[in-house]
Image: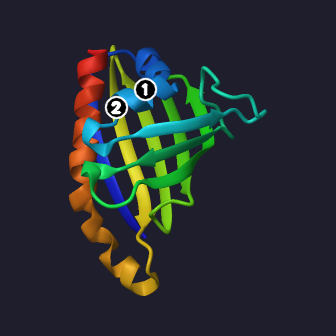
Amino acid sequence: MATYSRLTRVAAPLSEVWDFHSRISGLEALTPDWMNLRVESVTSPDGDPNPEIIETGSEIQVSMHPLGVGPRQTWTSVILDREREAGTATFRDEMRGGPFEKWVHTHRFVADGEETIVDDEVEYELPGGGLGRAASPLAVVGFEPMFRARHRATKELLE
C-alpha cells in the first residue's frame, strides 16, 4: 500500500488546531475550491444529523468534482477513532465507497509550546488490483497540490 504524508508547523496552540479540525466547517474551509467539495450529510454515531463535533463513528457523506473534470465522485468518510492526550491529538478517517480501493487518513497534532505540528498521513491504494497497486505511488501528483493548499489554509486561518 502506498503512503503520502505532509507536515506543517502552525503558530497556534493545539487546543485551537484540534477544535478547528473537529468540525465540518474546518473540512469545508480547508478543502480547495477547485475540488468542488459538497458535504451531503453528517451523522453522529447515535444517528443525529449535523453534530457540532465530529466523533468516533461519525459518518460524513461527501462528493467532489475536482477541476470540474469527469463525473462527481461520492463516498462516505467514517471517523475510525479520535484521541486527545496531553500534548497530542489524533483522528483517523476511512473512505468507503469512493474512488480509491483503500484510503485511511491519519491526522496527527503535536503541541510544541504555543505552536502545533500538523501531520497528515494517507495510506491508499488505487483500484484495479495489481495494476492499481503498482500505479498507486504516482497518485502523489494529485495529492500534493491538495494537501499543500490544505496546510496553507490551516496556517492562514489559525495563525
Q: Quadrant of residue 125?
A: bottom left
- Could you say which is closer to the camera, residue 147 or residue 85? 147
| Amino acid marked by disc 2 | Leu
Residue 45: percent from left, percent from top: 73, 36
User: Does residue 11 appear in the picture of this structure?
Assistant: no
Q: Is residue 142 left or right of residue 86?
A: left
Judged from this view, the residue extending furthest toward the right is: 46
- Could you say which is closer to the camera, residue 50 or residue 84? 50
Mark 2, residue position: 30
- Could you say which is closer to the camera, residue 36 or residue 30? 36
Mark 1, residue position: 26
Q: Is residue 108 above or below residue 101?
A: above
Label 1 close to label 2 by CB (< 8 Å): yes
Q: Residue at x 23, y 37 (%)?
A: 149
Q: Which mark is residue 97?
A: none
Q: Is residue 22 left or right of residue 71?
A: right
Q: Residues within 10 Å of mark 1 (few under 14, many from 20)?
A: some
Q: Residues within 10 Å of mark 2 (few under 14, many from 20)?
A: some
Please tell me whether mark 2 sits on a helix, a strand or a loop: helix
Q: Is residue 94 above or below residue 48?
A: below
From mark 1 to mark 2, how far is it between C-alphas? Answer: 6 Å
